[in-house]
Image (cartoon, rainbow, N blue to C red):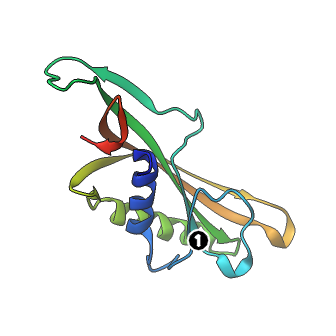
């Protein structure tokens, strides 16, 4: 089985696939350039600028053999669109669709985890005709695993 972070990333990809503006152009952990036919699109990462997942050992009330870890995992969703006169409107529409979709529960197996929007940012990148607009929504997903089973949500 995969680490809980991958399971969360996959579940988020499923939640944001088939949105009106980006459709099926959703890529987990994609860091290389996008072709014109892949725009507008979304990329989903389980990293933030600090590349930190905050982990806290839970000891009170823990009745299991192994310690439990309370985790706060950053989930970054980037929306990309080709620059045009209405790029702000397009990025805001992508953001709207992501936020509505992410308001739904994230279900992994029989467990549900919460995602809270932490920040949103927009920028333009590239040069000349290859410019794209990017909107970044950073969510924090909280979940619990046992020390010996980081692939199983508690």
Q: Nearer the viewer, residue 29 or 94?
A: 29
Tell me where residue 66 appears, x and y as whole percent: 27, 24
Q: Residues within 10 Å of mark 1 (few under 14, many from 20)?
A: many
What is the quadrant of residue 104 in the picture? Answer: bottom left
Q: Nearer the viewer, residue 93 or 105?
A: 105
The residue under the point 73% across, 78% down is 36
Tell me where residue 82 appears, x and y as whole percent: 69, 73
Mark 1 sits on what residue? 41
**Disc 1 element:** strand
Tell me where residue 112 appears, x and y as whole percent: 24, 52
152 sits to left or right of 26: left
Q: Quadrant of the C terminus?
A: top left
Compared to residue 23, the image places residue 80 above or below, namely above
What is the quadrant of residue 48 in the picture? Answer: top right
Residue 139 visible in the displayed image: no
| Callout count | 1
Compared to residue 128, the image places residue 1 above or below, namely above
Residue 100 visible in the displayed image: yes
Query: Furthest residue to the top?
Result: 60
78 sits to left or right of 130: left
Query: Furthest residue to the right?
Result: 128
Compared to residue 45, the image places residue 132 above or below, namely below
Tell me where residue 12 appears, x and y as whole percent: 41, 60
143 sits to left or right of 111: right
Q: Nearer the viewer, residue 82 or 42?
A: 42
1 sits to left or right of 61: right
What is the quadrant of residue 140 in the picture? Answer: top left
The residue under the point 59% across, 66% down is 88
Q: Nearer the viewer, residue 86 or 103?
A: 103
């Amino acid at each position: 089985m995969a680490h809980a972070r991958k399971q969360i990333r996959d579940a988020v990809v499923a939640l944001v696939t088939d949105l009106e503006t980006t459709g099926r152009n959703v890529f987990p952990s994609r860091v290389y350039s996008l072709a014109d036919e892949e725009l507008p699109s979304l990329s989903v990462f389980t990293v933030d600028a600090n590349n930190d997942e905050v982990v806290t050992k839970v000891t009170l009330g823990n009745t299991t053999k192994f310690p439990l870890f309370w985790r706060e995992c950053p989930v970054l969703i980037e929306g990309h669109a080709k620059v045009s006169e209405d790029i702000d409107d397009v990025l805001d529409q992508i953001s709207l669709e992501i936020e509505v979709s992410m308001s739904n529960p994230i279900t992994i197996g029989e467990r549900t985890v919460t995602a809270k929007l932490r920040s949103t940012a927009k920028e333009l990148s590239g040069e000349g005709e290859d410019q794209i607009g990017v909107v970044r929504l950073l969510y924090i997903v909280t979940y619990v695993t046992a020390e010996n089973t980081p692939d199983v949500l508690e």
